[in-house]
Amino acid sequence: MDSLDIVFTGFLISALRSATPLLLTLLGECLGQRTGVINLGAEGQMLVGAMAGYGATAAFGNPWVGLLAGAGAGVALSAVHALLVVGAQANQFASGLAVWMLGFGLSAYFGAALVGQQVTAFDSIDVGAAAQWPVIGSVIAGMTPTVLLALLLVPVIGLWFYRTRTGLRWRAVGESPAAARAAGVSPATVQIQAVLVGGLLSGLGGAALSVDYTRTWAEGMSAGRGLVAVGLVIVARWNPWWTLPAALLFGGAEALSLRLQTADTPISAQLLHILPYLVSLVVLTLTCLRRSDSGTPAGLKAVMDR
Amino acid sequence: MHVSLAGITKRYGAILANDDVDLDLVPGEVVALLGENGAGKSTLMKILFGFQQADAGEIRIDGRPVVIDSPRAAAALGIGMVFQQFSLVPALTVRENLALGHRCTPWWIGRGARSFAAPVAHLRDIAPEIEPDLPVSRLAVGEMQLVELAKVLNLDAGVVILDEPTSVLTPAESERLWEQVRRIAAGGAAVVLITHKLEDVFACAQRVAVMRRGRMVATLDTSSVTPDALVRLIVGAETVTTAQPVERTADALPRAWIKNLSATTAAGAIAGVDLRIAAGEILGIAGVSGNGQQTLADAVAGLAILLAGEVIVDGETLQAPRAEMPAQSAVAYLPEQPLRNAVAPDLSVAVNLMLKRIRDLPWRSHPSQFDADARERITAFDIRPTDPRATAASLSGGNLQKLVAARELAGAPALIVACYPTMGLDLGAAAAVYEALFAHARRGAAVLWISEDLDDLLRYAHRIAVLHRGRIAGIADTAQATRRQLGAWMVGHSIDVAAEPAHA
């Protein structure tokens, strides 16, 4: 294996690992928005997921328990958004901001005791013969369980969304709640389900961040990934399949910025830290310049108009 | 399935929408439910379909009283309804729309057409040419109506309700729909056709039920009634006030010239529209909704960015590409959907009446200054409620329409653009709006009048142009225009008047 190959696979692995928490959150946000609910609280859900996940891993010594706890915390917090937006017809942006701040506060308060604690890492996955495959073999071998989980969820959710009756119902609700209701589908039920699934996935994303990717807990550690997810849904054109390249964009930029920092580039580390956000912003802007047929669900446009 | 509604009563606030209404629906029979806007026919059918609950009265199916508390319950009982606003999801395909409400749709749909075979079976019967894999947004309005009908047939409905199905259709599409309606009834279903068009009644109904002001005034066999008698039943003892048509002034100079206009908005596109309107002339624009009418109106009124062309009024260029919007427009504009396009819903009626003169207001002005002025126009146009401080959003559709007319038709505009100005108004209020509009024509204003109501266009307009896919498909003097020709233009055929056989 030559050195270029090592650089490439190393970069791909770190891009994938960096993209994983975002990819999970992005999938959840995508589903929510497709049913007509924007959830700015994804950021707060990631934070409580990261905190609860880290805490549970530290307490039980098992990172899988941590992932479960993180997902559960995300669901619990997103229930607030579901209740306010679907139950009480509150403004989606106001409710999302409230959920975000609530998640930030709760995770900071309960997470204070976790700072500096050590957690057990995932055992490396035994991929058997796949590790010997040319080029991708080393990428596969370098994957952690959360990366694999996120990568598997993309086709699972993609197929479910476009190839099943329930997926069809969710799409109908996002495009036209009135038409869905006339067809015997309850838009409120579907939207509540979608927000909760979004909470589950963003909580899982948060836990993947603290338990697997950084293996630390710090206040506000999601660092805007939840909000980036809200924006990248547009880049992914509200299509679950496209969340993978959209998330890799962010992950790739972050991997690159880390590389540049270690390579002693004469650019300040603080500036390099903004690279993934800058790339996301530029791609988002470019996507929005192409106005025609952006794939926006009609029900979501109604939210913006209100 | 024999459905009978007995003693249905429904009250909205002070208005009695349905007052002790009885109606019997018999298998194999088409009943036309006739009445003016607001006569209570839609309310009655919404109660039968479970959208609303009656305050009193009962619904019996085959003699057994039933409770219908939701559209779902209605569907389970075999009652289906085709709405005026389609309940189709535009972004989904025809197949997906039909599968959405179908009980045979399996959980795993997959790619294959097999999962969709049952949902599209009825559609293949009534409209084999509709491609099931097209998104609904790409269908014509008439095709959407047929998909909607197939959806109702999928319920194996014993009662099929159609809410003003022909109001958005071309004459040819209407005929096709009538044929399907007769077929469904022949298949053993009871069909209710809500309509205000007499031609619908005589085309396919065996029985006609007429409603007026919430009451059922008559139920008759269609064969035993004349159109004149029906009109008298619909409007009741009230004298029908119709507006006086405007005399056409001979060879007047063109006052407004819409010169080779092209524009694109979210509502559609127009290309190369060229129209000249003489002083005192009423030019009607006919066409199936969505063929560029709104874009044309917006472009002429200066609300759309022009790609090419000009709007010239009294020799002065008012609108042109990259032109500044003139401060004081000589154009009065009555747009469609006034709540969305013509008023600030949360502001008062008085302020909304002032909006046109907003640039002339003093920097510091008090609402009471507008009130006196507003009261005058509220009385003149009979806007209800009469309180000038009521918010525009609290007005009914018809009263909003009157509010916009009161504002736009004040002063002396040189060109008036009116989109469906009488939509949602009863005959009396419609006549009042027409009178105000026509008074300006008599004064010498040029009027561009967009409407879907061919009867009114043929009665009042001097010339009628037909828009099809953003272009003028044809233009004719009203005296020489035939419904057949206008209908052909509406679907994009340009038949030559001279070549047309005398009677076809």
Image (cartoon, coloured by chain):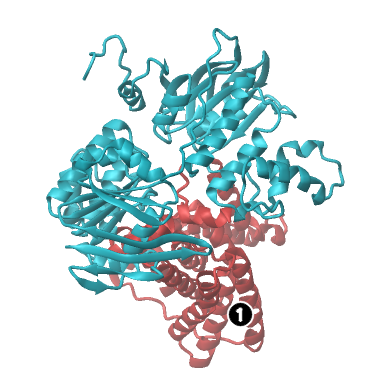
Residue B193, position as x, y percentages in the image? 28, 48
Chain the render paints red: A
Q: Nearer the viewer, residue B293 or B376?
A: B376
Q: Name the residue rendered at 59%, 59% in the picture.
A: A259
The residue that mark 1 highlights is A217
Residue B227, position as x, y percentages in the image? 30, 36
Q: Where is A239 relative to A186, above or below? A: above
Write down the quadrant of residue B52 in the picture: bottom left
Q: Nearer the viewer, residue A96 or B66?
A: B66
Q: Can I make out residue B345 in this image?
A: yes
Q: Where is A184 relative to B425, above or below? A: below
Q: Nearer the viewer, residue B290 or B41?
A: B41
Chain B painted colour: cyan
Horizontally, is B248 left or right of B56 in the view?
right
Image mark count? 1
Q: Nearer the viewer, residue A52 or A103?
A: A103
Residue A184, position as x, y percentages in the image? 32, 65
| Circle 1 SS class | loop
**Quadrant location, the C terminus of chain A:** bottom right
State which chain disc 1 sits on.
A
